[in-house]
Every structure is written in structure tokens, then in C-alpha cells.
Image (cartoon, rainbow, N blue to C red):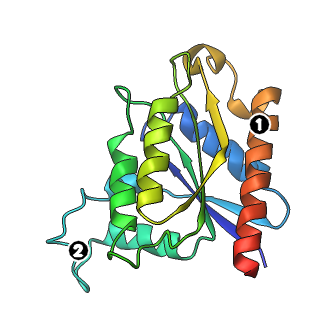
Amino acid sequence: MSVRILALVGSLRAGSHNRQLAEAAVELAPEGAEVELFEGLADVPFYNEDVDVEGSVPAAAAALRAAAQSADAFLFFSPEYNGTIPAVLKNAIDWLSRPYGAGAFGGKPVVVAGTAFGQYGGVWAQDEVRKSVGIAGGTVLEDVKLSIPGSLTRFAETHPSQDTEVVAQLTEILSRLHEHASDAVAA
């Protein structure tokens, strides 16, 4: 049985370096794992408990929940917007945290990675993602991190999948996430 890792990207821009990292993760998935890049976060409406009613959940939110329910683990790619988490990721976490006590994270392993232009690679935002998804029920692997600084210059002419250091780091976090997810599935 293959471990399913759902990748969620906090940037909606087509040329986003975080999206490129996620695309590289799809290609670098270890044997026995599949990384699915979720398409459609832009279509998920802001969380509103008034519309989160069984039988009338917006289709895009229902698709996100279905993808998350069938995942064994999560891999978030977060840029940093004004020092914090992008709204699209926070919104996804909000939808996936519900219904209260039975959200899609359900103790599944979570890793947060990303890149940003600043010298710290978006660590503030990534820490906020870890905090939020942990509160929402995910098992955040606090010691499995990847923050790549200087994205605009580092990836100006190179896709992250062509950067040997990034490939090695991404391969390592995927391997560790796969290991934790495999243990959780076997338990």
C-alpha cells in the first residue's frame, strides 16, 4: 500500500517558488509514497460556519476535505506574507479542522516547508502554519523543517528541482514524513 501525502501550497501564483518546491516533491516522492499536489485552494471560500452545513458544503471545500481525508500525511509549502501565514493556507486549515473534533488532520503527520525572499526563508510563516495545523489536530513533525532563504535570487534562473542542495533537503524531509506516515498507517 502506498502512503498518500497531500501537498498544499500557500501561494496561488503560477510561477511561485513554493509551488515549484511542491512540484519537485511530487517528482521526488520516495518509493512507497505518492505526493498529490492539491489544485483548487483558490476556489475554496473563506471558512464560514453558516455554510459548513452537511449537504450544502461548497464543492471546492468538499473536494479539499475529501482529498485530506484520503491522505495519510500532509506537506505544507508556505511563503511568508507580511511576516505571517498566507490566507489561503489558514483558510484550508480552518476548513480541514472541522467538524470540531472530527477534522481531516486526525493526528496524521504534518511537515511544513517553504521558501521566501527574506534571509530566513519564511520561518515566521512556517512556524504559524505548524502552530495552526497542530491546534487543528495534525501531528506536526517539529524537527522536520526546510526553510530556503533568498528565493527570488536563488531560483531566478533555476527550478528548485535543479538545485542539488534543495533536492537533497527535500528528499530528506519527504523520507522522514513517509517514515512517520508509514508507522501511523501500520498502527
Q: In the displayed structure, would residue 142 be above or below residue 50? A: above
Judged left or right of residue 38, residue 100 is left
Which residue has dot 2 on it? 52
Residue drawn where x is 56% and y is 31% of the image: 17
Instruction: Tell me, for residue 112, which label it has, or none.
Output: none
The number of callouts visible is 2
The image quadrant where one finds the N terminus is bottom right
Residue drawn where x is 37% and y is 77% of the image: 101
Q: In the displayed structure, would residue 95 be above or below residue 148? A: below
Tag 1 and tag 2, C-beta contact below 8 Å: no
**Circle 2 — which element?**
loop
**Circle 1 — which element?**
helix
Residue 147, how many percent across, how many down?
Answer: 61, 31
The foreground one among 79 and 11 is 79
The image quadrant where one finds the C terminus is bottom right
> To which quarter of the image does residue 139 belong?
bottom right
Residue drawn where x is 63% and y is 39% of the image: 21
Of the residues shown, which amino acid type is indicated by label 2? Asp
The foreground one among 146 and 32 is 146
> To which quarter of the image does residue 94 belong?
bottom left
Residue 156, how many percent across, how many down?
Answer: 61, 17
Of the residues shown, which amino acid type is indicated by label 1? Gln
> To which quarter of the image does residue 6 belong?
bottom right
Which tag, 1 or 2, sits closer to the chain's start? 2
Residue 33, how many percent across, how many down?
Answer: 76, 64
Residue 13, how many percent across, how many down?
Answer: 43, 36
Instruction: Tell me, for residue 169, which label it has, or none.
Output: 1
Q: Quote the CA–CA distance across marks 1 and 2.
A: 38 Å
Which residue, as the protein is rendered here, is positioned at the far bottom?
55
Judged left or right of residue 43, residue 169 is right
